[in-house]
Image: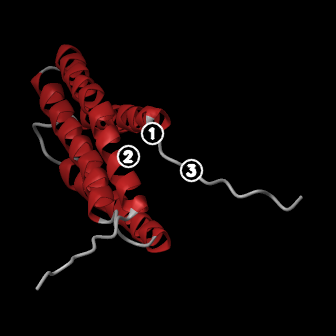
Amino acid sequence: MTVMTEKTENPHAQSVLKLADAMYRGALWPGIATVVVGAVVSLLLVGLHGLFGALAGGVIAFASSLVTLWMMRKTAAMDPMALMAVSLGGYILKILVLLGVMMLLRHVGFLHVKALAFTMLAVILVWAAAEFLAFRRTRIPTIIPASDS
């Protein structure tokens, strides 16, 4: 008796996974470089408190960006409409967690708050720009519906 298993490929999931991989590869080194630059600049301008603040902000922003890519990979096989709902909910949750972490860390004595905030902001912006560039370079079919007019 022969058992045949038919594996159906999900082209949407394949596209999302391909995009997540490209975004990770494209954003990893610019993100690391931004953390290093933020740490060095903060160390020179503020001292050790600035270094610790910049490293904390860089690690938090880096982790936040990695969580986004992890969410992409975990939800890749979902229906596109459900995926958008999960993405929006995940984004809102991530922003709330970042806000909570920032509120908790602002009273930690050995962290320079501005170094933490500026490094976090820089890493998030550089990571987003690198993800955008990776998205533009990745060859993924996109359907743009024709307008009625």
Image position, residue 13 (x, y; %) = 36, 60
Image position, residue 112 (x, y; %) = 20, 34
* Residue depicted at x 24% and y 17%: 41
Q: Is residue 119 visible?
A: no
The local secondary structure at tag 2 comes to helix
Total numbered labels placed on residues in the image: 3
Of the residues tagged 1 and 3, which is closer to the observer? 3
Spatial CA distance of label 1 from label 2 is 7 Å
Looking at the image, tell me whether mark 3 or mark 2 is earlier in sequence order. 2
Classify the position of the C terminus by image quarter.
bottom right
The reply to whether dot 1 and dot 3 touch (C-beta < 8 Å) is: no
Spatial CA distance of label 1 from label 3 is 11 Å
* Residue depicted at x 25% and y 36%: 116
Which residue corresponds to mark 1? 135
* Badge 3 amino acid: Thr
Q: Along the horizontal axis of the image, is 85 left or right of 64?
A: right
- How many residues crowd around disc 3 within 10 Å: few (fewer than 14), some, or many (20 or more)? few
Q: 54 or 137, which lies in front?
A: 137
Q: Which corner quadrant of the image does residue 39 belong to?
A: top left
Image position, residue 52 (x, y; %) = 12, 32
- How many residues crowd around disc 1 within 10 Å: few (fewer than 14), some, or many (20 or more)? some
Which residue corresponds to mark 2? 19
Looking at the image, tell me whether mark 1 or mark 2 is earlier in sequence order. 2
Image position, residue 125 (x, y; %) = 40, 35
Q: 55 or 42, which lies in front?
A: 55
Which residue corresponds to mark 3? 142
Q: Which corner quadrant of the image does residue 34 belong to?
A: top left
The local secondary structure at tag 1 comes to helix
The reply to whether dot 1 and dot 2 touch (C-beta < 8 Å) is: yes
